[in-house]
Image (cartoon, grey):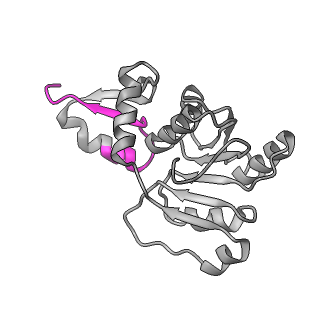
């Protein structure tokens, strides 16, 4: 969030409400940015995003995220371009965002994938898109989050879907790779 330069008057769009997306929503809410728009295929994850501070929820199977963003921007008189936080990490998604976004959109890629991917630079240049990969979290982010949890300003428990034993870790990792499990799983080594 810090490196994005997002501020009052911007309308953020968080793509994905898994663990990284929920962290992005919490960070935006903590900075007083609103409304926060979240797009995710899972109704359960969209509702979790609401618990973390999102006000506008989008099901991309019903409405394309940038169509929802344009509608919300018009209703609220937002004149700044979208600030997008890509938190899915699916191959091809950044290119899809570039193809469908507004002029001057800023895309911050927090999701990660483990294969090569391609971005058409001409598409991005034509729209003046800024794409930034990574850049955090920094040590201050980890300590700030820990402080917020310890002081009761941030409740991480809504994102914890299950507590599992060591034997269940391979199946939980497989679910996470397919975005079918809960955003966070706690491994209790003694079952």
Residue 186 covered by magenta stretch = yes
Percent x, y of residue 131: 57, 65
**Residue 42 location (% of width, % of height):** 57, 39
Q: How many marks?
A: 0
Q: Quadrant of residue 175?
A: top left
Query: What residue appears at the point 37 percent right and 64 percent down from the top-left corner?
Result: 114
On screen, residue 101 above or below 12: below
Please, is residue 48 above or below residue 132 in the view? Answer: above
Residue 5 lies in the magenta stretch: no
The region drawn magenta spans 173-191
Q: Nearer the viewer, residue 72 or 168?
A: 72
- State left or right for residue 16 relative to residue 140: right
Q: Residue at x 65, y 53 (%)?
A: 83
* Coordinates of residue 157 in the picture (x, y in percent): 41, 24
**Residue 51 image position (x, y, % from top left):** 56, 26
User: Could you tell me which quadrant the C terminus lies in?
Assistant: top left
Residue ID at (44%, 58%)? 134
For the residue pair 80 and 57, the one nearer the viewer reads as: 80
Report whether 55 appears left or right of 191: right
Residue with the most extreme top position:
152
Above/below status of 168 relative to 190: below
Question: Can you name the residue that lies furthest to the bottom here?
Answer: 122
Task: Residue at 80%, 50% (x, y): give it.
Answer: 70
């Amino acid at each position: 969030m810090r490196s994005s330069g997002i501020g009052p008057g911007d309308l953020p769009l968080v793509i994905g409400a898994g663990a990284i997306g929920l962290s992005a929503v919490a960070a935006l809410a903590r900075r007083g940015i609103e409304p926060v728009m979240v797009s995710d295929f899972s109704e359960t994850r969209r509702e979790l995003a609401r618990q973390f501070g999102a006000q506008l929820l989008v099901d991309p199977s019903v409405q394309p995220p940038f169509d929802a963003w344009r509608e919300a921007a018009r209703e609220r008189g937002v004149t700044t371009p979208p600030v997008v936080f890509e938190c899915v990490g699916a191959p091809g998604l950044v290119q899809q965002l570039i193809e469908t976004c507004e002029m001057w959109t800023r895309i911050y890629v927090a999701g990660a994938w483990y294969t090569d991917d391609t971005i058409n630079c001409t598409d991005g240049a034509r729209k003046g898109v800024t794409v930034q990969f990574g850049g955090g979290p920094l040590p201050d982010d980890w300590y700030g989050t820990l402080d917020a949890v310890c002081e009761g300003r941030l409740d991480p428990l809504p994102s914890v879907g299950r507590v599992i034993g060591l034997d269940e870790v391979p199946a939980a990792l497989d679910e996470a790779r397919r975005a079918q499990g809960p955003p966070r799983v706690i491994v209790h080594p003694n079952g």
